[in-house]
Image (tube, rainbow, N blue to C red):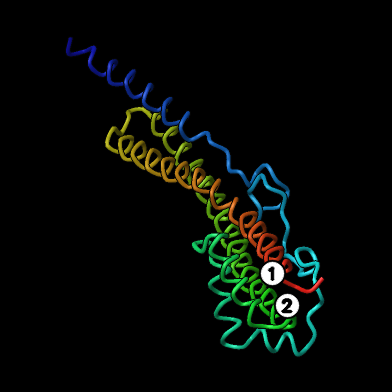
Amino acid sequence: MIRSLPVAVSVARGVAVAVLFALSSVPVLAATSSDPDWPCVQRRQPELSLAQVWSGPSPDAATQELARSAEVSGLAQRLAQRRTTMDEAETLIADFAAHHDAPAQVALFLAIFEQIQDARNKVMAGIARYAHHQTEMDAQINDLRHRLETLNAAQPQDFDAIDKAEADLDWSTRIFQDRQQSLTYVCETPVVLEQRAFALAKAVAAHLPK
């Protein structure tokens, strides 16, 4: 019985290592794309242009200046925020249109667009950083996997070192998988912002003179 204990331990460790390797075999999303800055399944649109979402009058210099005024930029900031529902946004836009002329309404959407564009640019930059970090973590997991393989192949085995390597691999893999799952939500954010820009453009344009 005493002589069989190392065999049982070795078998148990072999099972544990197999499970860890299975857990750590999740590929980095960025690896499926030729663009290391874009790990998302959604098509990358580096930057929006005003013409893509706005079919109303083009803003002139005076309109651009008006868009930077405290009243217009303050309302635009509230409208651009996703916590403001579209029903609330449409009410705020209708109230603004009732007291302001067409140039002011165009200025309002210009200010909204700039707010959304700025938020979207920050998200895109964040996705790029996220992708690079995941790639680095994937490399670290591979290194840990190879270290564990080496430790298990060594004779005699250093069980303390194996335990630590298993724990490190398990922890790193779980963090990596959690971040991969979060990436699904993160990748949807630019699309959500684009959709909001289109919806707000339509809401503002609805009050312009035909």
Q: Which residue lies furthest to the left in this view?
A: 2
**In what quadrant of the picture does the N terminus appear?**
top left
Task: Check if mark 2's residue and mark 1's residue have beta carbons within 8 Å.
Answer: yes
Q: Residue furthest top?
A: 1
Q: Is residue 44 above or below residue 11?
A: below
- Which residue is painted at 66% across and 83% down in the image? 100
Q: Nearer the viewer, residue 169 or 38?
A: 38
- Mark 2 — residue? 106
Label 2: few (<14), some or many (≥20) within 10 Å?
A: many
Question: Which three-letter amino acid code belongs to the residue tagged 2?
Answer: Val
Left or right: 170 with respect to 99?
left
**In what quadrant of the picture does the C terminus appear?**
bottom right
Residue 180 placement (x, y as % from top left): 51, 44
Residue 10 placement (x, y as % from top left): 32, 21
- Which residue is painted at 45% across and 44% down in the image? 178
Label 1: few (<14), some or many (≥20) within 10 Å?
A: many
Question: Which three-letter amino acid code belongs to the residue tagged 1?
Answer: Val
- Indicate the quadrant where residue 17 lies: top left
